[in-house]
């Protein structure tokens, strides 16, 4: 099977799985938001955000390196012994880092002036942090073999475990501790599942390897990725931590509404880049013409999808907020501001994947460091004055900045037909504006579910008529579902 077909299949399966996962995840978020209210919701997500920032100090970019190196080995002459040592070396490094980082998390949260319940939630979330980082490495092996099928299944099962156990806990009114434990149960399942998968399917022998030469080799490879990953993770979650410190748990709960909407929508660029990254790594070595084609298609598809979501969410913000209790009405403005960053957020996934796959991870790292530092500055400046609105403005500004810094380097790597991509952007924007006007005038008369469907039909018909995508594009996605990924 050629790599192009495999990319399409991986994207299709992973996209379908992530759609299911995000639907379940967002539905669960709505339920717990309605039950807990903004303040308890803020405590719950502060604990998750706090430990998620620290989790990158365990991974330090090793997941990306595993995928890239295994893809290159597999693309040339497979060396099973080298792959075994690489995976075991990563596991050994992560084990040592997990111990140190866990101790740091426990120490820091006890030094901060947080109530006992918040500290306990952080401890429980810490278990998820450790389990998830090992799981990510195991699935990185599968991605290196250009296989996302089994990870797709796991992502859905994980969310089903969280949903079912969480609903029982909410029904029995067991409290925040047990609600966090539902995440621990799901993370433990994912850990076992991914471990057994690579042991049985690809015969990877996993052990705690503390070989100095191998560990030094891995750390040298991960160094450029590590700095990027640390700043990227801090950039993504530090705003929630700062909101908790500077504005209180309630503002964290309010901010989680637009944050979760954005997070739920990221399944599309995640699916594209999860499938494209190993292929791009291989194309960079063997087929630069196909690398350019793959990147342009990813940019076009991500713009075509993200632009109408942005326009539709802005027009329907007041309707969407009705899914939550009246206590979340303050989230409308942050939602409109945050969703405006979606287009930049989507295409940044493709740009980042290209830079990393083409040995430009240092450039990507520098860009992320700049963006993260500006994000901290803006959050410190705006949150005390504007609370969650200030954090949302920061999201919009920094995502645009990340796009500007990244796109500058793309023509230096591939022959980019920027005019063609910009033309697709204009066609999509025009169709989205027409759709937005139609939805705005019809929303007092039509149920929001039917309105979303109608808006989608209007938009995609217009984009198709304007030539934003062709019949062949639809058929290629349809055909990619017909056979199982190898």
Image (tube, helix red, strand yellow):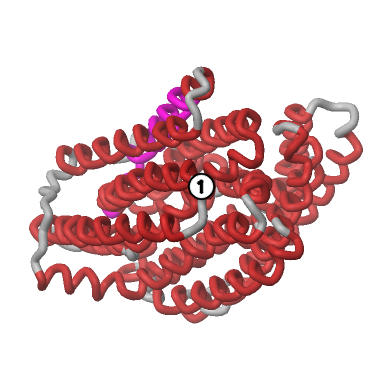
**If the image is split into quadrants, where does the C terminus sit?**
top left
Give the image quarter of residue 387: bottom right
Q: Residue furthest bottom?
A: 412
Residue 424 visible, this angle: no
- Residue 153: say if magenta: yes
Q: What are the residue bounds of the magenta stretch? A: 144-166
Q: Position of residue 376 (x, y in %)?
A: 58, 70
- Residue 336: say if magenta: no
Tally of numbered tags: 1
Mark 1 lies on residue? 115
Q: Position of residue 4 (x, y in %)?
A: 39, 52
Q: Position of residue 312 (x, y in %)?
A: 76, 44
| Figure check: 56 above or below 14 | below
Horizontally, is 79 left or right of 73 in the view? left
Q: Residue at x 27, y 50 (%)?
A: 134
Q: Nearer the viewer, residue 358 or 54?
A: 54
Q: Position of residue 228 (x, y in %)?
A: 42, 70
Q: Residue at x 43, y 56 (%)?
A: 109
Q: Nearer the viewer, residue 410 or 121?
A: 121
Residue 11 visible, this angle: yes
Horizontally, is 350 left or right of 64 in the view? right
- By secondary structure, the bulk of the magenta-drawn segment is best described as helix
Q: Residue at x 12, y 44 (%)?
A: 203
Q: Residue at x 49, y 75 (%)?
A: 369
Q: Nearer the viewer, residue 191 or 466?
A: 191
Horizontally, is 327 left or right of 360 in the view? right
Q: Nearer the viewer, residue 348 or 27?
A: 27
């Amino acid at each position: 099977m050629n790599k192009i077909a495999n990319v399409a299949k991986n994207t299709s399966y992973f996209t379908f799985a992530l759609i299911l996962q995000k639907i379940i995840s967002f539905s669960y978020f709505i339920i717990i938001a309605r039950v807990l209210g903004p303040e308890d919701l803020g405590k719950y997500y502060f604990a998750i955000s706090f430990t998620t920032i620290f989790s990158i100090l365990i991974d330090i970019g090793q997941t990306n390196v595993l995928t890239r190196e295994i893809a290159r080995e597999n693309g040339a002459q497979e060396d099973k012994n080298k792959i075994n040592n690489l995976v075991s070396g990563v596991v050994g490094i992560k084990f040592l880092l997990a111990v140190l980082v866990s101790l740091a998390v426990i120490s820091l949260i006890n030094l901060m002036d947080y109530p006992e319940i918040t500290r306990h939630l952080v401890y429980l979330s810490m278990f998820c942090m450790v389990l998830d980082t090992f799981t990510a490495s195991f699935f990185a092996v599968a991605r290196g073999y250009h296989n996302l099928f089994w990870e797709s299944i796991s992502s859905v099962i994980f969310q089903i475990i969280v949903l079912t156990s969480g609903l029982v806990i909410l029904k029995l009114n067991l409290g925040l501790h047990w609600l966090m434990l539902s995440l621990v149960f799901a993370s433990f399942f994912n850990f076992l599942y991914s471990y057994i998968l690579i042991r049985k399917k690809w015969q990877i022998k996993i052990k705690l390897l503390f070989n100095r030469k191998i560990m030094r080799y891995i750390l040298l490879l991960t160094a450029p990725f590590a700095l990027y990953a640390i700043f990227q993770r801090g950039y993504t979650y530090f705003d929630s931590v700062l909101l908790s410190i500077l504005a209180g748990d309630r503002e964290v709960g309010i901010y989680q509404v637009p944050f979760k909407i954005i997070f739920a929508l990221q399944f599309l660029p995640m699916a594209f880049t999860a499938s494209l990254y190993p292929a791009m790594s291989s194309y960079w070595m063997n087929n630069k013409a196909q690398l350019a084609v793959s990147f342009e298609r990813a940019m076009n598809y991500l713009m075509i999808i993200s632009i109408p979501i942005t326009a539709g969410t802005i027009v329907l913000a007041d309707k969407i907020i009705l899914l939550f209790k009246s206590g979340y009405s303050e989230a409308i403005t942050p939602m409109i501001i945050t969703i405006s960053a979606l287009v930049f957020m989507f295409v940044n996934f493709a740009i980042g994947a290209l830079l990393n796959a083409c040995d430009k991870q240092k450039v990507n790292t520098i860009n992320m460091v700049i963006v993260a530092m500006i994000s901290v500055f803006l959050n410190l400046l705006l949150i005390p004055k504007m609370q969650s609105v200030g954090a949302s403005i920061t999201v919009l500004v920094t995502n645009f900045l990340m796009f500007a810094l990244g796109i500058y380097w793309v023509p230096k790597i591939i022959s980019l037909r920027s005019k063609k991509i910009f033309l697709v952007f204009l066609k999509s924007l025009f169709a989205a504006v027409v759709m937005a006007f139609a939805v705005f005038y019809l929303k007092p008369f039509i149920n929001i579910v039917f309105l979303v469907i109608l808006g989608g039909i209007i938009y995609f018909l217009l984009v198709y008529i304007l030539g934003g995508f062709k019949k062949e594009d639809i058929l290629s996605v349809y055909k990619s579902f017909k056979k199982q990924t190898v």
